[in-house]
Amino acid sequence: MKQACIAAAVAGMLWIAVQGHSPEDSQDPPAATAQQGRGAGPQRGASAPGRQGGGQRANFPQQQRAPGDPAAIARGRALFGVHCTACHGADLRGGDQGGPNLLRSQIILTDRHGENMLPVIRDGRQGAVGTMPAFRLPEPDLLAIAEYIHTVMGQAGRQGRPPERDTPVELNVLVGDAAAGQRYFEKVCGRCHSASGDLRGVAARVVDARALQDLWVSGGLSGRGGGRGGGRGDEMSRVQVTVTSPGGAHVTGRLVRIDDFVVTIVQEDGVRRTFRRDGSIPKVEINDPLEPHRRLVLELADRDMHDVTAYLATLK
């Protein structure tokens, strides 16, 4: 009896094991899932559907969208070169006028159809590094710029690197009217500059047209060569400050540092002095020769900018 019970128990266990193992479980796993696991990814050379750049994972909207209209992209590239390159650079990583790196911009990284970009381009924006002017362009032009930026972003490398190019970008900024530029120069710039004085032969000293445009718009602080300055330190060295104490004593020197709490200057004899500030005491008067250029950037029209550049290019 005991042996019969043991035999029945063994038979029952075998029956359960056979019923619990379905035919599907005995099949080999599909090739695609058999290779999955930690660190697994698409095979080398494969690209995800809708991705514009090859060899990398599509990790933001621009790399997940289908390629745009080639004609719109070409138009957007030309418009970007005229309106945007000076601030954002030809590779979108920031230009000589101090614009931010667009390859890392959350506005662009999360944009799909221009819903983020178009309001900024059309209306301008006050940013941490300066003011972006508004560009009152037709809607198709705004969309073309956005489409071009999408294309560049879709081919961008990791860590915000720009896409690799087979040939360097060549931009022609000499597209203005030199005669109109001369009239604008004499009206707006002639108060401080002269074609026969400080700017005589400027086109011979600054051969590159983009560098020449950056030079005159920024006042010589673009750092692209040909300018008298090269950065923030040189910019500060041009600013003269007069500090007047409550007793009426005046101290004048070159600005080194200024904030809400202190102002530091260097006098002509090389003595460095720092004054503590408490509101409007002491009185601080700043003479910044580049202030007119800063104001000009906010009101300068693209046509006038290119016209003046075309005119200055004739001063050889």
Image (tube, rainbow, N blue to C red):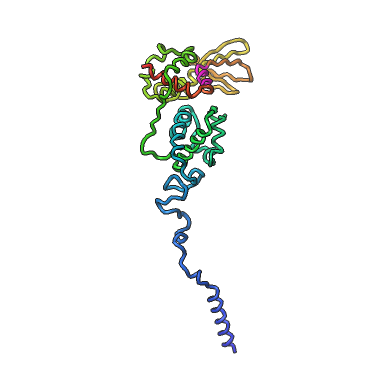
Q: Residue at x 48, y 57 (%)?
A: 37
For this rendering, which residue is in front, 162 or 237? Answer: 162
x then y, percent, for residue 40: 45, 55
| Residue 245: quadrant of the picture | top right
The dominant secondary structure in magenta is helix
x then y, percent, for residue 222: 44, 24
Q: Residue extending furthest top?
A: 248
| Residue 163: quadrant of the picture | top left
Q: Is residue 166 left or right of residue 39?
A: left
User: Is 101 drawn above or below residue 39 in the view shown?
Assistant: above
Q: Quadrant of the C terminus?
A: top left
Q: Residue at x 57, y 15 (%)?
A: 285
x then y, percent, for residue 168: 37, 34
Q: Is residue 209 left or right of residue 287?
A: left
The residues colored magenta run 288-296
Q: In this view of the protein, can residue 119 be seen by the observer?
A: yes
User: Is 213 drawn above or below residue 58 in the view shown?
Assistant: above
x then y, percent, for residue 265: 52, 18
Q: Residue at x 54, y 36 (%)?
A: 117
Q: Quadrant of the N terminus?
A: bottom right
Task: Reply yes or no: does residue 162 show up in magenta.
Answer: no
User: Is 119 drawn above or below residue 259 in the view shown?
Assistant: below
